[in-house]
Image (cartoon, rainbow, N blue to C red):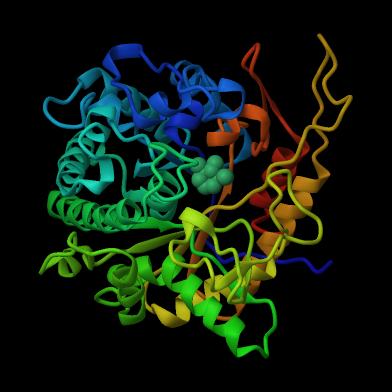
Amino acid sequence: MTQLRFPENFLWGAATAAYQIEGAARDDGRGTSIWDTFSRTPGKVHQGHTGDVACDHYHRYAEDVALMAELGLGAYRFSVAWPRVQPDGTGPVNPRGLDFYDRLVDALLDRGIDPIVTLYHWDLPQALGDRGGWTNRATAEHFATYATAVYGRLGDRVSVWTTLNEPWCSAYLGYGSGVHAPGEQDPAAAFAAVHHLLLGHGLAARALRAAGARTVGITLNPADVRPADESSAADAAAVRLVDGLHNRIFLGPLLAGGYPEDVLEHVSRLVEPTFLRDGDEKQIAAPIDLLGINYYQPTYVAGRPDGAGGGGAYPGTDGAVEFLPPVGPLTEMGWMVEPAGLTRLLERIAADYPGVPLLITENGAAYPDKPGTESPGGPIQVADSDRIAYLDGHLRAAHEAISRGVDLRGYLVWSLLDNFEWAEGYRKRFGIVHVDYLTQRRTPKSSARWYQEVISRNGL
Ligand code: IFM
C-alpha cells in the first residue's frame, strides 16, 4: 500500500462522551439525566446496563489522560454532562460539577492535548425531560444559558466548542423510533425536537461567540445516502427524500439560510409545524467555524411503493422507501464497512456548503474481543486487526478527500475507551483501549499502538 502523509497541523485525536464513560452518576451534586431514567427502565437497554459506573472516568481521568499522552493524541473530544453543571437543567450552577471539567482540561493542557468540548451528547437533565425535553422550545433557551455557564468556567483554556452531537439521533431516535432516551415514538415530537435542537444550537453558538469563543461548531452524523440502482429514477427520489430527512433538514438551516422547501413540504404533510416561528431560521444560521462529521457507514435505499420505510427514525418514508440491508463485511453493530462513503460525504458537504472547515469528530468500529485474548491474571492482549483495517481504510478515504480539495482539519477516533454503547449497553466495544469493567483496568489494544504509530508518522 502506498504511504500517505497528512497535512502539517492535521489534528489527531480521540473522542468520548460523558454518559458513556464518566460513571459517578450520583457524585458531587450531579442531577439525573434522561439517559439515567431510560437505562434504569427495564427493557430499554441491553441486560439493564446503565451508565452509573461506566468506565469510572470521573475518578480515573488522570490515568486516562496519561494514556492519551502515551498514544500521542493532539486532541481529545469529550462532552460535558449538563446535569453535572445544572442538576435540574435550569437555575443555579453546581460548582462541583464544573470542577471536574476544570481538572480534566488542566490535565489535558499539562500534557499538550487540545480539549475539544461538546456541550450536549444526549444526557438532557431529567427535569427538562419532564417538561417535554426537546419538544419544548424553552429547552433551546436553557441550553444557551447552560452553554454560557460552561464557557464561563472553561473558556479561558478551551478554544474549540461544539454545541450538539448528532442531533439526528437526539431527535429521531429519542422521539421518533424511541430506541434512545426519552423513548418517545411520535413524528410530531421528532420534528419539534429537530427544530428546537437546531434553535438551541443557534442560540448557544451566538452566546458562546458573544462570550469570546474563538472556534464554534456543531457535530452532525450526515448519511451518505446511495441509490440501490444508479439508473433508477425511483431510487433517486428515495435518495432525495432520505437525504432531506437526514442531512438537509440540518445542513440547510445551519449553512444555507433555512429549511429546504421539499423537506418543509414533507414535514408539513405529516405534522403541523407550529414549532417553526418567524426569525428562528435566522437564529439557527449563526455562523460556525467548524463542522464536525461523524461517519460509520453508508445508507442504501430504493424507491418502492411497498417499501417498509425507516420507521420512526425516518417519518413518512413507509410506502415509498426500502432501506437495503447492509452487505459485505459488517462490524459488530451490523454496520457496513465502506470507506468510500466517507470520501463521498466529505466531498459532497464541502461542495454543497463551501467555506466551512470540516473535522471528523467520530469514526470507528465495534468488534468483539477475540476469544482467548484475555488471560486471567496475565497481560491482556487484544489483537483487533479488524478495527485496524477499518481505521486504515477510513483514514485513506479521508486522505483521498483532502487530496481532492476538501478542507479537512483532523480525525478523532471513536472511541478512546470501550464504553456504554447506549441501547446496546456494554456489549459493543468501540474502544482502541480495552476496558475490563470488573477491574476498570485499561489496556491499549493493537489498534491503539497502530494509531500511535500513525500519529507519530502523521500518516499511513
Ligand atoms: O457511541 C456512539 C456515539 O455516542 C455517537 N456516535 C456513534 C457512536 C457509535 O454508535
Q: Is residue 109 left or right of residue 56?
A: left
- The answer to which quarter of the image holds residue 27 is top left
| Above or below, comparing residue 289 to residue 11 in the picture | below
Give the residue displayed 20% in from the left and 46% down from the top: 136
Q: Residue at x 50, y 31 (%)?
A: 20
Residue 4 rendering spot, x and y as whole percentages = 71, 66
- From this viewpoint, which residue is outermost toward the right? 372
Looking at the image, which is closer to me, 51 or 288?
Answer: 51
- Where 298 falls versus 125 (above or below)? below
**Where is residue 221 shown, x and y percent of the image?**
48, 58
Q: Is residue 220 left or right of residue 458?
A: left
**Residue 211 makes an appearance in the image:** yes
Quarter residue 270 falls in: bottom left
Residue 336 horizontal/vertical position (percent):
71, 58
Q: Position of residue 278 (x, y in %)?
A: 10, 69
Question: Residue at the location (47% across, 61% down)?
Answer: 314
Q: Is residue 142 left or right of residue 176?
A: left
- On the rendered image, what quadrant is the N terminus found in? bottom right
Q: Nearer the viewer, residue 433 or 226?
A: 226
User: Can you say whether 313 is above or below 102 in the image?
Assistant: below
